[in-house]
Amino acid sequence: MLQTPRARVARRPVHGVLLLDKPLGWSSNDALQKVKWLLRAEKAGHTGTLDPLASGVLPLCFGAATKFSQLQLDADKTYEAVACLGVKTSTADAEGSVIETRPVKVDDEALQRVVAQFTGLIRQTPPMHSALKKDGRALYDYARAGIEVEREARELRIMELTARLASEVSGRELIKMTVKCSKGTYIRTLAEDMGEALGCGAHLTALRRTATGGFGLALCVTLEALEDMTEEERLKCLLPVDSLLSGHTPVELDAENSGRFLSGLRRRGAWTDTAQAAVYAGNPRTLLGSAHVKAGELIPTRLLSPVEIEQMNRF
């Protein structure tokens, strides 16, 4: 029986940021492609992966917003996590096979000593089951082939770490924790390392990102909610492109300097030095791009195109 060809989706320019509450079981890319299809967007990208095991805040960038997605990749993150004590797995999380079990003799005093040990600047060795590259191949490719490769420990910062002991109905001892950390932190590795410090081993069983770069769950929308919306309602869920630049110093240019800035030319003015500036044209106030200011010189970093600016003003 011949199947009817699936109708092609008519793509359109969409500019902005959608904060998705990524569901469990979905890869970040699968979630992105689903939302991109729902919005009929031409261009999209996410801001760092959340494992299928994890849920929570995943900023999705569309159109001009993709030019500033690196800011979210570099942003601090906050997670709620659960680790099971006494059981180590091959992947440091619940998706791996059990490789070791040990008795658990942990009290709150011991746990808080370990919390202090893992707060502040720490060094962490990236897990083999990760997307980091070694000689052009992802580490998880080596892991699936049974090959262990040498990885360098990296310095990162745990700004806040709170943890308490809990128990499953089955009797397993758990740690429930909240972690605010710098980019590049692997929470499953943190859970495994804390388990080793407690002398019993551990693996991650649940992970939820509650905030990233100033965006929290309160602003997020679920895939189910998006699917139930009209196209107009979905577009209203988008935050403006400059929501990614909320920590930047605003700089406003007149018409002549706006045109020159957009062509990549540096501008001079009485601006205070800053590493991050959001540059606007006035009347109507329109984002032109990002820059930095050094010795009174406004130096472009990322520029929007005239087409992107026209489309953003139109919609």
Image: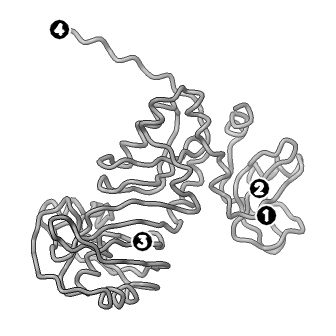
4 or 3: tag closer to the N-terminus: 4
1 or 3: tag closer to the N-terminus: 3
Q: CA distance from mark 3 to mark 2?
A: 36 Å
Q: Amino acid at mark 2?
A: Val
Which residue carries the number 2 mark? 279
Which residue carries the number 3 mark? 178
Indicate the quadrant containing the C terminus: top left, top right, bottom left or bottom right: top right
Which residue carries the number 4 mark? 1
- Asked if the residues shown at circle 1 and circle 2 are in contact, with their CB atoms under 8 angstroms apart, the answer is yes
Q: Percent position (x, y) of residue 41?
A: 52, 33
Q: Amino acid at mark 3?
A: Thr
Colour pattern of the rendering: one colour
Which residue carries the number 1 mark? 298
Q: CA distance from mark 1 to mark 3?
A: 40 Å
Q: Is residue 146 left or right of residue 272?
A: left
For the point 39% across and 56% down, the residue is 49
Q: In which image quadrant can residue 134 be found? A: bottom left
Q: Percent position (x, y) of residue 175?
A: 29, 74
Q: In which image quadrant can residue 298 be found? A: bottom right
- Asked if the residues shown at circle 1 and circle 3 are in contact, with their CB atoms under 8 angstroms apart, the answer is no
Of the two numbered discs 4 and 1 in the rendering, the one whose residue sits closer to the viewer: 4
Q: Amino acid at mark 1?
A: Leu
4 or 1: tag closer to the N-terminus: 4
2 or 4: tag closer to the N-terminus: 4
